[in-house]
Image (tube, grey):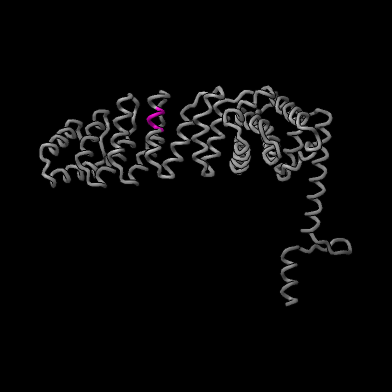
Amino acid sequence: MMAVAIARMTSKFRLSRHTGGLFLVGLSSLVRSIHLSQDLKESVEDLVQKKSYERIPDILDSSEELCRNPSLFGFLSNLSRDTRIHVIDEMLRSFGSIRPRWKPWNVYSCLLGYTLQSCDPFPISLCIIQRMLRSGCLPVPQTHVFLTSAWLESRSWSHSAADILLDMKSIGHSPDCGTCNYVITSLCAVDQLNEAMHVLSCIARAGCIPDTDSYGTVIAAMCRARKTTQAVEMLREMVTKAALTPRQDTMAKVILALRKNKEVRKAVGVIELLENEDHDIGFEVYERTVESCLACDEYVLAAKTVMRMTARGFIPYIMVRQRLVEGLTARGDWDLACAVRQRFAELGS
């Protein structure tokens, strides 16, 4: 047993002989890392006190592994709320002149981690997210979890989504669609679909107009959850009320979700809705709809969709064409089978 314990210890700590003594390299590396982290914290705090904010990205870039620790800005907790927000806001504004614009990414990440885990995360966290997005950067993936947790806690105190967003104005910032969309994306990423739908319905009151990404993110989450009725209604609202054009991948996700639920008539209805609103529908969306109809033996619906498809200049894959004609023929729909075959011949297929 002793031999096993020794073997485990020696595998964990590589021993190195150096000038008359044995040193635990792993332990010394850990100690050195602690010293570096402490030195980095002191350096950051010193630069903040001197208001030399533009120099912070340089020292964090040189210690990338350590800079992800939100505790680097833990000293800000010693300040009053208003002073803390003022200092962070000053930092954000000072980074606006730094080029390339993504250079302060490490600072943004560290600040965001600190503020989201603080007792008063809003509105300053949203301002950091906004600055990151405008600089062409994305927060680290785990931000979705921290942001959602902080958001739901704030909402539990009867704060409306619009009020949380509008609170950005209290420190000289204004909510924009990109920031709102990131909140929606975070909520959807951790299965808070109902709250994401609430935010989507409220962002207009915060002075932002929902865009294609706003709707597309929520629709995609509905499709993943196979809430097809809600997805179709949201798509309808998007194209009729908001007058927005959904992306092809959004259309395809709705059709695929309907196919999984064997709701092919709704899928054909989606095609009709998009055509009636004069939106461009890509080949993949038509093809998936036809395949969905064939998978459910709905050959007449498939034929009608193919007619719509060919009217836009698209021709189904050969296996789909053959299966459609054979299925119509087997059902005794000779006239429709001939019409479909004639249509294919006119298009030279």
Does 118 appear above or below 135?
below
Q: Position of residue 337 (x, y in %)?
A: 14, 39
Say left or right for 326 vs 222.
left
Q: Position of residue 43 (x, y in %)?
A: 82, 37
**Image-quadrant location for residue 304:** top left
Q: Residue at x 27, y 32 (%)?
A: 314
Q: Quadrant of the N terminus?
A: bottom right
Q: Could you say which is closer to the camera, residue 148 or residue 39?
A: 148
Q: Position of residue 344 (x, y in %)?
A: 19, 35
Q: Residue at x 11, y 44 (%)?
A: 332
Classified by dominant secondary structure, the portion drawn in magenta counts as helix
The magenta segment is 234-238
Say left or right for 51 vs 331.
right
Residue furthest right in the image: 20
Residue 226 in the magenta stretch? The answer is no
Q: Could you say which is closer to the camera, residue 103 or residue 113?
A: 113
**Image-quadrant location for residue 270:** top left
